[in-house]
Image (cartoon, helix red, strand yellow):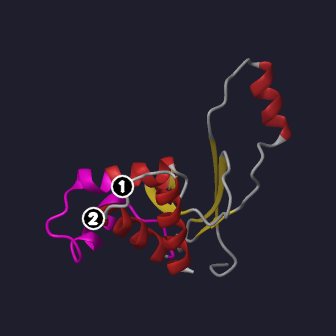
Amino acid sequence: MLKNYLQKAFEYCVQNKLRWTRPRAQVLEIIAASSKPLTAYEILTRLTTTLNKPNPPTVYRALEFWKEHRFIHRIESLNAYFMCAADHQHQGSQFLICDNCGDVIEAHICALPHALQERVANNSFKLSRWNFEVHGICSDCR
């Protein structure tokens, strides 16, 4: 799966005339290989094994790039990044986060719930993106 994910990202960059750089590729590989969300500094620590003296701006630029192109998600409540498991583009994200073990499951609802759509429309609010994070205890930890 990891190899396919990286190949898909590479092809996306080629098709869209985007730069495929070593730091970008390695940041994406680190995130995709992790079963848990990673903070920027956790990524930086792992990156030091493959890049010579990487610095935080290098990591943050790569994270912004992959987030902008929807290959990764930012888990706001954890200030961490996680691979997008969806095989399609979507506007919103939904996560089930275990407060015990830290596992994250991407829910793939892909559509804003009707009640929120109404609230957005009734308030003449222009929606740009949305993110739901549901915290609890996973079945493995119960």
Location of the C terminus by quadrant is bottom right
Boundaries of the magenta span: 35-60
What whole-number distance in Å separates the C-alpha atoms at marks 1 and 2?
11 Å
Look at 69% across and 22% down and name the residue there.
125
Determine whether, in the image, residue 3 is placed left or right of residue 48: right
Q: Name the residue under label 2.
A: 44
Q: What element carries label 1?
A: helix
| Three-letter code, disc 2 | Leu
* Residue 44 sits inside the magenta stretch: yes
| Three-letter code, disc 1 | Ala
Is 60 rendered above or below residue 103?
above
Residue nearest the viewer, comparing 97 with 58: 58
Q: Position of residue 55 (x, y in %)?
A: 19, 57
Look at 62% across and 39% down and name the residue there.
129
Q: Position of residue 71 (x, y in %)?
A: 53, 59
Give residue 1's mark: none
Q: Where is residue 57 in the image (x, y as percent from the top left)?
A: 25, 50
Q: Quadrant of residue 88?
A: bottom right
- Mark 1, Cα crowd under 10 Å, few <14 / some 14-19 / many 20+, is many
